[in-house]
Amino acid sequence: MSAYDDLIAFDRETQALAQVMGRLGWDQETVMPRGAADQRSDEMAAMEAVLHARRTDPRVGEWLAKAEAADEVARATLRLIERVYRRTTKVPAKLASQIARVTSRAQGIWAEARAAESVSDFLPTLAEVLRLKREEAAAIAEGGDAYDALLQDYEPGITGAEIAALFGRMRPRLVDLRARIMESGMTPAPLQGRFDDKAQMALAHDLAMRFGYDFRHGRIDKAVHPFSSGSGRDVRITTRVVETDPFNCLYSTIHEVGHACYELGIDPAYHLSALGQGVSMGVHESQSRSYENQMGRSRAFTGWLYGAMTDQFGDLGLDGPEAFHATVNRVQSGYIRTEADEVHYNLHVLLRFDLERALISGDLAVADLEAAWNDRFKADFGVAVDKPSNGMLQDVHWSVGLFGYFPTYTLGNAYAGCLFQTLRGDVPELDVALAMGDPSPATSWMAANLQTHGGLYEPRDVVESAARMQVSEGPLLDYLDAKFGAIYGV
């Protein structure tokens, strides 16, 4: 066998083990007994030690030095394996194992602190996670910017300065649109009443299938924080049910289906290889956000959903499909990012980006995080945070060490704006299909133009190739202005 063949065979086993570790994480979030948390943290640490040892195995460096790429796929595969090898060899094995152990335990502590509305119960653990992530960032950065180093795990090739510039261009138009909507005096009616748990899950199951989720290779479970897990032939999603808010379940499901369909849509030839996962979290979010928003909250699709929900739940107390569309897209200053309307959503992300960047740099102390969060939230949203679960304890990300992840949500929105603008031109009959509850013309376009490539191209390259334009915030902001201008008459 050649050096390339040896490397690919070794990496395939590493990829398979990584999937096993991912399944442990899925289990922890869904069905693991609460009393198993300490043992699970040891299991996760042990798995991380095995993975770290494989990813830093000296033979990987030797194979990389000797391997010859015969084609584009081989070149991309070597590029990604080398990227992981160079990064991982900079992080001591003991530190990698310690991060896995602490973040596994921290997840449970965060959940308990959130339930108890007690920030003080979480702060010591968060401080420990932050200390370890700073240490990791310093090792990776080798004198460079620590936050930029962490970003590479989620959006390779981008810097904090580039993200800050993009967000800086977005902020004025978002704030202006929000102000015009709030001054319009129009307030779409919210849904009232209680919506049966089983009925919500039945409709969520139907929506998942309509958006292309393949239940032969997946399943839906419930979790505190909805997520998607896995790649290849086993891609699972979770949702959550609030009996007074069925949109929470239905749109969380559509969102996670977007993630899952990206993984399921990757060329099967890439399974259990370096190319066999979504190329970045920003590109991942471009799929989930376009599924949820540009498709799922469109006038055409909500017209169909109005009928489906009426069939499932009876009279919704709204004056027809147009009123329902306005209710689905109701703009209000809510606390929760995952429940936020499209106008406010990016303001939530901008807040988190600025705070976590300050945490990593040391400009913000963990002890001061809650006050900083609450002050910024009041300034951006016009309301005071009423309880920690609606404030800094609402997201799981920092407890599990995902510093650098948050900005990819808004990057994904910007990518989605570019992609969907082109998709609209390529699929002129889309609204007719959506009005019949059939998103397949759009999901098929995404699969063919973006999802199939997996990690073959760099994040910006794959988006720009599919969208046939340079990435910018313009298409997203134009879409938001047009959509909400029509709903609110502003």
Image: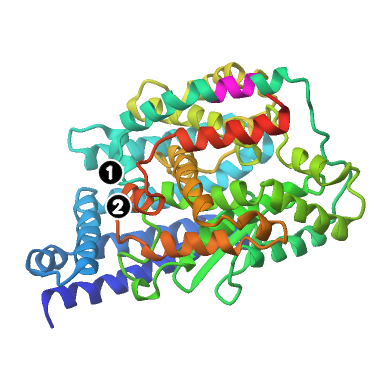
Left or right: where does residue 119 sit relative to residue 353?
right
The answer to whether 453 is drawn above or below residue 325 in the figure is below
Q: Secondary structure at mark 2?
A: loop
Residue 430 in sight here: yes
Cβ–Cβ under 8 Å for marks 2 and 1: yes
Is residue 86 located in the magenta-colored stretch of the structure? no
Question: Which quarter of the figure is the N terminus placed in?
Answer: bottom left
Residue 197 rendering spot, x and y as whole percentages? 80, 57
Crowd band around label 1 with a 10 angstrom C-alpha radius: few (<14), some (14–19), many (20+): few
The residue identified by callout 2 is 458
Q: Which mark is residue 167?
A: none
Q: Residue at x 80, y 42 (%)?
A: 322
Q: Which mark is residue 157?
A: 1
Residue 230 rendering spot, x and y as whole percentages? 47, 64
Mark 1 is on which residue type? Gly
- Give the camera-side residue of 113 and 1: 1
Task: Look at the image and give the residue range highlighted in magenta.
Answer: 174-179
Give the image quarter of residue 67. bottom left
Residue 486 rendering spot, x and y as whole percentages? 69, 33
Is residue 175 located in the magenta-colored stretch of the structure? yes
Q: Residue at x 35, y 59 (%)?
A: 48
Disc with the residue nearer the chain's start (2 vs 1)? 1
Residue 335 in sight here: no
